[in-house]
Image (spheres, rainbow, N blue to C red):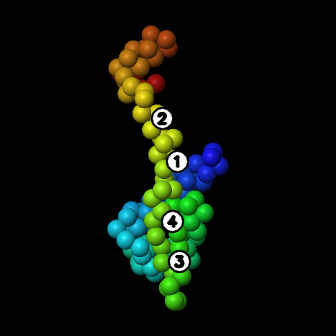
Amino acid sequence: MSDDLDTVFAALADPTRRAILAMLLEDDMAVTDVAEPFEMSLAAISKHLAILTRAGLISRERRGRVTWCRLEPDALRSASVWMQGFGQFDRLDFDAFERFLERELGVPANDPE
């Protein structure tokens, strides 16, 4: 499962790939339609699509001469479950953290060094 999570998070790390996923939330799209809003070559978009496919986040299907892309929402399930495990922790109290640093390191909170 760790390898699968690594692959999903690596795919999600790129803003172009996240934008592609957001576009596919609406509906299936032809590869050429996916590429249209981006200022990059079709080959570059194809590489992004290959990464998303390997991560299981999208699937591609040939229909005649056109390749269509479809979002695979269940692929995010394991990543979502993993991230929810962190929801059990309280939000970080930055004031307390500042006081701790000041006490332990002797650096005043408003000192930029």
Mark before the other along the chain sequence, 2 or 1 = 1
Tell me, yes or no, if residue 25 can be seen here.
yes
> Distance between the Cα atoms at labels 2 and 3?
34 Å
Q: Which mark is residue 61?
A: 3
The answer to whether any part of residue 6 appears in the image is no
Q: Badge 4: how crowded within 10 Å, few (<14), some, or many (20+)?
A: many
Mark 3 vs mark 4, CA separation in Å: 10 Å
Q: Upstream in the sequence, badge 1 or badge 4?
A: 4
Q: Going from the N terminus, do you reach mark 2 or mark 3 first?
A: 3
In three-dimensional space, the C-alpha distance between marks 1 and 3, rounded to whole angstroms, equals: 24 Å
Residue name at image x 45 percent, y 17 percent: 101
Spatial separation of the CA atoms under disc 2 and disc 1: 11 Å
- Give the residue type that dot 1 points to: Ser
Q: Say whether marks 1 and 3 touch (CB < 8 Å).
A: no
Residue 89, percent from left and from top: 43, 27
In the rendered structure, which amino acid carries the disc numbered 4? Ile
